[in-house]
Image (tube, helix red, strand yellow):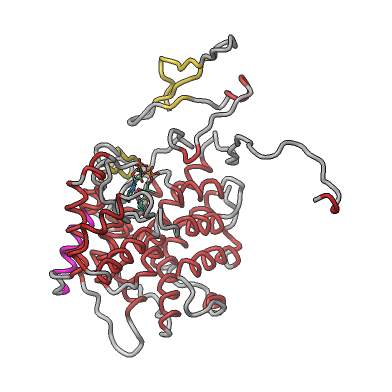
Amino acid sequence: MKLAENKATLTYNNGASSIDLPVYQGNIGPDVIDIRKLYAQTGMFTYDPGFLSTASCQSSITYIDGDKGELLYRGYPIEQLATNCDFLETCHLLLYGDLPDAAGKIEFSERVTHHTMVHEQMQFFLRGFRRDAHPMAILTGLVGALSAFYHDSTDINNPAHRDISAIRLIAKMPTLVAMAYKYNAGQPYMYPKNNLSYAGNFLHMMFATPCEEYVVNPVIERALDRILVLHADHEQNASTSTVRLCGSSGTNPFAAIAAGVACLWGPAHGGANEACLNMLEGIMKNGGIETVGEFMEQVKDKNSGVKLMGFGHRVYKNYDPRAKLMQETCKEVLAELGLENDPLFKLAMALEKIALEDDYFVSRKLYPNVDFYSGIVQRAIGIPVELFTAVFASARTVGWMAQLNEMISDPEYKIGRPRQLFTGETRRDVPPMSDR
Ligand code: ACO
């Protein structure tokens, strides 16, 4: 980060002397005012719940221009990556800073492929869950439990430990997600197959059974791969910030990623794809496409508590570029499966059209986000709704690990410890029981 020529000056209207604060410039995006010494100099904190104006770190991984609707991984536009690269190339890019060459791609794929099996003991751990447990509850537990299986890679300060943990996590996440699915379905777990692509193997572990040969459909394989590429990283979102904060205490990488999985689960974040599909199915049950106008009136009524799930974003104030790519994939998958007239897709298109023309959404710059169409694609592929967020977690694991690596390698890194504005009771004495 580069020190800007200008400084920010903080002045008070009570006669206290003003102070100068350094300003830093990134390569693109807004400058930042460095307030690290503010408390030491003034005895005051800044107040920014929800981090509306606070950069929590410097990062060189992912850049979003929310006004333009642009997303870059290590400088490459998401549209080019989604069209020209597969998920493992994207993982290499995010983790190591650049796309692999042909030999590097083979080597990286082989490393990941040879770590896809999980310890046999893991299935006994999984058996402790109820069969109807939510896959994200299972995944939070299983990922955290990995720290009990890989004692040789739990030192977050050791780059080699972090590297092998990243490979293990990227490799094993689909295996764990598929195991959670099979456990719920009451079907036998399918071991990974090394001759398949990352996405192909994911589909195989989910949908194959030992009874017959499973042939991977290349259109579905590409669609799943694209879902993974589009969800691989998204700078300092809630789950990534959770991973960073959790990792900043020096905990092991598996524990930090488990914290990210837990955060991603929420409907305002990764759980939005599940919430979006439930919303679409709810509209279909309650009268179908003819009732979208009525539904939109509820969305616009602040007292109803109804939101248009899959719409809006803290950073994008324009069309989420991932939503465009996901809509394209959605059309491809539905055509391949003969579902062009899928009522949920038609409903989603109708809602999108109304929202893009309605002043409520236009004035608030609310556009479809990636989750608006990803649920429809996943449902068409045959992935059950409650598993959507777990698929997202598989994709985001690489981003979380890349961000964790970056944080630990940053010489300015410290344990994350926000401060507060205290509004509770001031000091008082505990009354005797008879007076309470
Ligand atoms: N439906 C209806 N109104 C909305 C929606 C929505 N989906 N999203 C935002 N708004 C309204 C808010 O009520 C608010 O209105 P107001 O200014 O009149 O009070 C205004 O738009 C601004 O919204 P905020 O909630 O302040 O924006 P914030 O940045 O805090 O929230 C969020 C962003 C959480 C994503 C929100 O848009 C939302 O809940 N969307 C639905 C859930 C969703 O799709 N989440 C996925 C995000 S992408 C991801 O994690 C992969």
Where 432 falls versus 175 (above or below)? above
Q: Position of residue 56 (x, y in %)?
A: 48, 37
Q: Position of residue 266 (x, y in %)?
A: 44, 57
Does residue 328 show up magenta in the picture?
Answer: yes
In the rendered image, which quarter is residue 76 located in? top left
Q: Nearer the viewer, residue 114 or 166?
A: 166
Name the quarter where the N terminus is drawn. top left
Residue 230 seen in the figure:
no
What span is in magenta?
Answer: 325-337
Could you tell me what secondary structure mostly forms the magenta stretch?
A: helix
| Residue 363 in sight in this render | yes
Total of numbered circles in the picture?
Answer: 0
Above or below residue 105? Residue 7 is: above
Q: Residue at x 33, y 45 (%)?
A: 98
Q: Position of residue 120 (x, y in %)?
A: 52, 78
Q: Nearer the viewer, residue 242 or 369?
A: 369
Whether residue 243 is in magenta: the answer is no
* Residue found at x 54% / y 12%: 13
Q: Is residue 386 left or right of residue 311?
A: right
Indicate whether 430 appears above or below 296: above
Location of residue 251 in the rendering, given as x and y in whole percent from the top left corner: 60, 52
* Residue 25 found in image quarter: top left
Q: Residue at x 17, y 53 (%)?
A: 353
- What residue lies at 33% left-to-right and 66% top-to-bottom? 278
